[in-house]
Amino acid sequence: MATPLVGIIMGSKTDLPIMEKASKLLEEFGVPHTIDVASAHRNPDVVLPWALGAQEAGYKVLIAGAGRAAHLPGVVAAHTALPVIGVPCLSDHLGGADALYSIVQMPPGVPVATVGIDSAKNAGILAVQILALSDPELAAKLADFRAKQSSEGMEHREISADGSTAPRVGFAPR
Ligand code: RP5
């Protein structure tokens, strides 16, 4: 089995429906990765060795997702020099703003690259972009992905402009 390049970790199995979107994206790109569940406050004895050993284990990027007082991404980042991408997970309180602020507001010195609330797919894409810097094959896949996305965007535009690609002026209905 290929050495996993991306390590995904989340604070609870209840985060899985969100975090599996990162895994799905990495699968699409053929990026070997692992998924783990360990909470920074309930399982610190698991989180610390995972983060401390991640670089030696061969990981290049880590993705950490958590909800509420979401300290997992910051704790992971504090124990590794690898780039850490944080995913604020929506919980049943405060609309996910609690997790967003907890993750994005890291004090200067230990950054967590934070994506939007529940935006685990973007975390996967960002991980691919980082890996693609030193992997031409992955860079080519990323270019295809962007091109496909762009042409889909144009299709949407044609629908919204009644089949015409001419730009609309202001908000006047046709
Ligand atoms: C966080 O608390 C987890 O990341 C999860 O988003 C949230 C709730 O966890 P559970 O009580 O559902 O396990 O630690």
Image: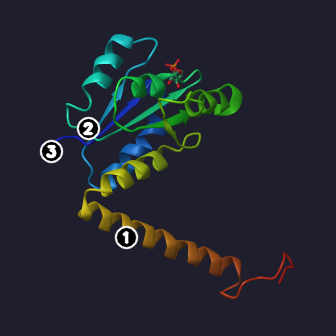
In terms of sequence position, does the residue under pointer 1 or pointer 3 come before the other?
3
Near mark 2 (Cα within 10 A), the count class, few <14, some 14-19 or many ≥20, is: some
What amino acid does circle 2 point to? Tyr
State the mark number for residue 69: none
Q: CA distance from mark 1 to mark 3?
A: 23 Å
Q: Quadrant of residue 89?
A: top right
Q: Quadrant of residue 3?
A: top left
Query: Please, what secondary structure does the residue beneath circle 3 have?
Result: loop
What amino acid does circle 1 point to? Asp
Q: CA distance from mark 1 to mark 2?
A: 25 Å
Near mark 1 (Cα within 10 A), the count class, few <14, some 14-19 or many ≥20, is: few
At a point 38% along the width and 12% down the height, the residue shown is 44
What amino acid does circle 3 point to? Ala
Query: Please, what secondary structure does the residue beneath circle 1 have?
Result: helix
Instruction: State the residue position of label 3.
Output: 2
Total marks shown come to 3
Instruction: State the residue position of label 1.
Output: 144
At a point 31% along the width and 57% down the height, the residue shown is 132
Question: Which quarter of the figure is the N terminus placed in?
Answer: top left
User: Residue 54, image x and y in percent?
Assistant: 27, 30
Instruction: State the residue position of label 2.
Output: 59
Q: Is label 2 or label 3 in front?
A: 2
User: Residue 103, image x and y in percent?
Assistant: 55, 30
Question: Which quarter of the figure is the C terminus placed in?
Answer: bottom right
The image's colour scheme reads rainbow
